[in-house]
Amino acid sequence: MPDISTKWKEKNIMNIKEYTKKDGTKVYRTNVYLGVDSLTGKQVRTSVTAKSRKMCETKAHQAINDFISNGSTIAREKVVFDNFEDLALSWFESYKLTVKANSIRVANNYLKSYLLPELGSYRVDRITPMLLQTIVNKWAENANTAEIVNGRREKGKCKDYKLLLNLIKRIMTYGMQLGALVDNPANQVISPKLKTRTNTKIKYLDNEELKQFLNYLDELDSTTDNQMRATLYRFLLATGLRIGEALALNWSDIDFIDKSVSVNKTIVQTVDKKERIQDSPKTVESDRIVTLDSSTISLLKEWKKCQNSNVITLNDSLIFSCNEHTYTYASEVLRLKTHFKRAGVPNIGFHGFRHTHASLLMNNDVNPKEIQKRLGHTKIATTLDTYSHLAKSKEKETAEKFSSILKAL
């Protein structure tokens, strides 16, 4: 198959014309067909001029090569990056304008912990499918062999290597859009399969442990801090909210008449405290209204009086704050661990309150669809798969029901 140079010669060599300028000097000129612009879809032509026929031909070849290396377009200038790190950071600046704070934090962690250490110093045009496959295989091997402690793999050995590969694909595609790359080598990489590990049982308080913890809360000294935390813990147990959702609530989110709470934002981990509250929850389904029982409404009213020192205020403050001090997940998780220890119950973490809430409802025959709605799960399968376990007493009750059904036949 003839190369580009041969094709150009066949079409254009006879079109090089000689011209005499006003000062008597001779020049050679030709019109060059570059191809179809990949962005506009239009045919692109240009002209070149040189002092000799040979130089004119050389410049024509160069024009064609430049057009191709720029992504077959003249609609943009070719952007050059020294290495993958420069390309990735350029992509990241654009990416940050399109997503929420938590997504920015996650992508930044992936870049710093995985992508840049492996690929940062490579020239982008030297990154091959084989190189990327080797790296992804290593990530997969680490994920499949890493020790899992408390549901977490060792640092630097996450199971999200498919997401890491997807990030590389997006960064490389960005490079193609800027004309820095001709193709995307990541598209040819195959993501290995993640080995199935034994599922870790969810952490929640059983009935006896829950009674013990609630009795402990009742016996706490009546300080402002203790009342705030006791209210927070009971609120989480009563609603199944995520801790980030609860800490982001304002008093205006509580409807004391209708006995409900509007969940429409969440706390995210970010350096900038002004951006700590994300104005939307985890998912679309997480934006929801959760009904409250009368005891929880009374509890919130008592806390509101204490928070404001019995003074009526028009400020729409955060519910779980005190004296203009806002509480963060990082500090509160340590405090919660201390309370669990003093209460003599297992450390189930903040998410354990959510699990306890759902488990109680599931074991008391509440419709799973209603539980899904309260928890803000996208799919009911998530609710059923997570909380399909039954209390021992419920298992016996189910067996007795089956026996009754048989007798009624």
Image (spheres, rainbow, N blue to C red):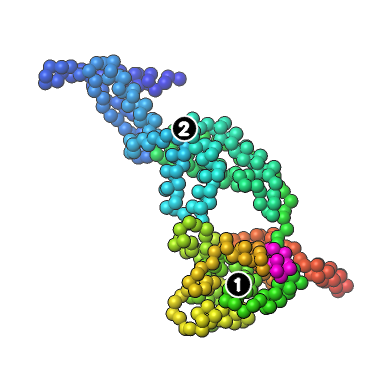
The amino acid pointed to by label 1 is Arg
What residue do we see at 31% from left, 23% from top? 60
Task: Please name the residue shown 35% across and 26% down the image.
Answer: 64
Residue 259 placement: quadrant: bottom right
Residue interval drawn in magenta: 340-348
**Closer to us: 51 or 277:** 277
Q: Toward which corner of the image does residue 408 lie, by quadrant?
A: bottom right
Location of residue 266 in the rendering, given as x and y in whole percent from the top left corner = 52, 64
Quadrant housing the N terminus: top left
Front-most of residues 19 and 235: 235
The tally of labels here is 2
Tell me residue 254's x, y (percent).
53, 76
Can the viewer see residue 205?
no
Q: Is residue 330 above or below residue 259?
A: above
Instruction: Reply above or below: 271 against 3.
Output: below
Mark 2 highlights which residue?
A: 123
Percent position of residue 348, x then y: 68, 63
Asked if residue 343 lies in the magenta stretch, the reply is yes
How packed mark 1 is, by other alpha carbons closer than 10 Å (few <14, some 14-19, many 20 or more), is: some
Image quadrant containing the C terminus: bottom right
- Decide if residue 5 is in sight here: yes
Q: Is residue 266 magenta?
A: no
Q: Identify the residue at horizontal 50%, vertical 69% (top origin).
A: 325
